[in-house]
Image (tube, helix red, strand yellow):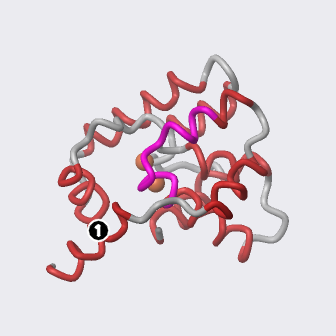
Amino acid sequence: MFYRLTQAWRAIFIKVSKEDRELALSILKETWEREIFLSLSEYDQNHSIRIVKEIILEVKTPSKLLLRLSLLHDCGKSSSLTLIDRALYSKFKISRKEISKHSYLGYLKVKQWDLELAELISKHHSEGEDNTIETFQYYDNRN
Ligand SMILES: [Fe+2]
Ligand SMILES: [Fe+2]
């Protein structure tokens, strides 16, 4: 328990490195998606980049959509969550209601730009037969 909290606190305070940000921007080409990504907390940017790095290492020819979903999936999370909320959120999971709320808010943010991506974001915590979401969830849960 103490270890998990320490781990969460550490994760919150790590800044996004220049290389990692460049990697993200090499995948996100459009201004709107870059703006959304850069508006995420450093914590969420790091989380998303870790997912992308693992996918690049382990998935044979990952689709552009999978990589963009990985970078933007949590864009509905409020950046006003307190640090303690975030530690609890990442390590102990908060309520289902909160999860479906951020999926839906993310959908609303992205749907005007890219409906296909927005729909994946809205379902990124749901179970289903979609291959992209299944692959994404495997890596999201590990990171
Ligand atoms: Fe999420
Ligand atoms: Fe996530």
Reply yes or no: does residue 125 show up in magenta: no
* Left or right position of 128 against 87: right
Q: Position of residue 134 (x, y in %)?
A: 59, 58
What is the count of numbered marks? Answer: 1
Q: Please tell me in which quadrant of the rendered image residue 111 appears.
A: top right
Residue that mark 1 sits on:
8
Which quarter of the rendered picture does the N terminus lie within? bottom left
Rendered position, 43 above or below 110: below
Q: Position of residue 27 (x, y in %)?
A: 76, 49
Q: Position of residue 41 (x, y in %)?
A: 42, 46
Residue shown at 43% from the left, 34% from the top:
76
> Which is the main secondary structure of the residues drawn in magenta?
helix
Residue shown at 64% from the left, 55% from the top:
21
Reply yes or no: does residue 41 show up in magenta: yes
Q: Residue furthest left?
A: 2
85 or 93, which lies in front?
85
Residue shown at 45% from the left, 65% from the top:
141
Rendered position, 97 above or below 113: below
Q: Residues within 10 Å of mark 1 (few under 14, many from 20)?
A: many
Q: Please tell me in which quadrant of the rendered image residue 115 appears.
A: top right
Secondary structure, mark 1, is helix
126 or 39, which lies in front?
39
Q: Residue furthest top?
A: 112
Q: Please tell me in which quadrant of the rendered image residue 98 appears.
A: top left
Q: Provide the residue span drawn in magenta.
A: 35-46
Q: The residue under label 1 is which amino acid type?
A: Ala
Q: Residue furthest front?
A: 18
